Image (tube, rainbow, N blue to C red):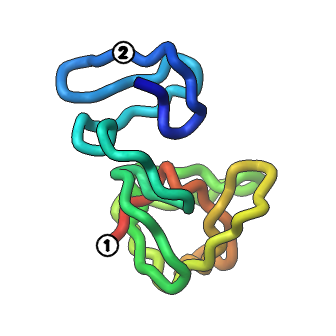
Amino acid sequence: MKCPRCASEHVYQDASLWVCPECAHEWNEATAETPSEPGIRDANGNALTDGDTVTVIKDLKVKGSSLVVKGGTKVKNIRLVTDAADGHDIACKIDGIGAMNLKSEFVKRA
């Protein structure tokens, strides 16, 4: 078994989840047996596409500001950024905050 995110061979099973100690990626057995398709995926492993609506899964501090994006916030009409060097692979506009980038590991498809 290899990690679908970083291809590490040092994965282990914890209850019903597989865990990679190198990149901290967790996935369930159903997705562990099927090869992962390329593309950007949400926290649950669902493939994301341009124009999707996603929900933020935890409170996120906005860097350089005192603002916080609350968990449960719906973000409509996302744009995927495939060449993001800093890991922020979703470009979006959040009501009350404005344009910003998010990491796909902190959202789930709505």
Q: Residue at x 33, y 37 (%)?
A: 32
Q: Is residue 63 left or right of residue 69?
A: right
Instruction: Kindly check if marks 2 and 1 are in contact, taking CB atoms under 8 A apart as contact.
Output: no
Image position of 36 with respect to 52: above or below: above
Q: Quadrant of the N terminus?
A: top left
Name the residue nearer the viewer: 27 or 68.
Answer: 27
Q: Earlier in the sequence, mark 2 or mark 1?
A: 2
Image position of 57 with respect to 55: above or below: above
**How far across and how far down the image is residue 21, in percent?**
50, 17
Image position of 60 with respect to 3: above or below: below
Q: Name the quadrant containing residue 98.
A: bottom right
Image position of 93 with respect to 2: above or below: below
- Residue where numbered disc 2 is placed: 12
**How far across and how far down the image is residue 17, in percent?**
27, 28
Q: Residue at x 39, y 33 (%)?
A: 26
Q: Residues within 10 Å of mark 1 (few under 14, many from 20)?
A: few
Q: Amino acid at mark 2?
A: Tyr
Q: Name the quadrant containing residue 57.
A: bottom left
Residue pushed farthest left? Answer: 15
Name the residue nearer the viewer: 19 or 108.
Answer: 19
**How far across and how far down the image is residue 14, in percent?**
26, 18
> Which numbered mark, 2 or 1, is in the foreground of this view?
2
Mark 2–mark 1 distance (CA, rounded to whole Å): 30 Å
Q: Quadrant of the C terminus?
A: bottom left
Name the residue nearer the viewer: 58 or 87.
Answer: 87
Name the residue nearer the viewer: 53 or 48.
Answer: 48
Res 110 label: 1
Q: Amino acid at mark 1?
A: Ala
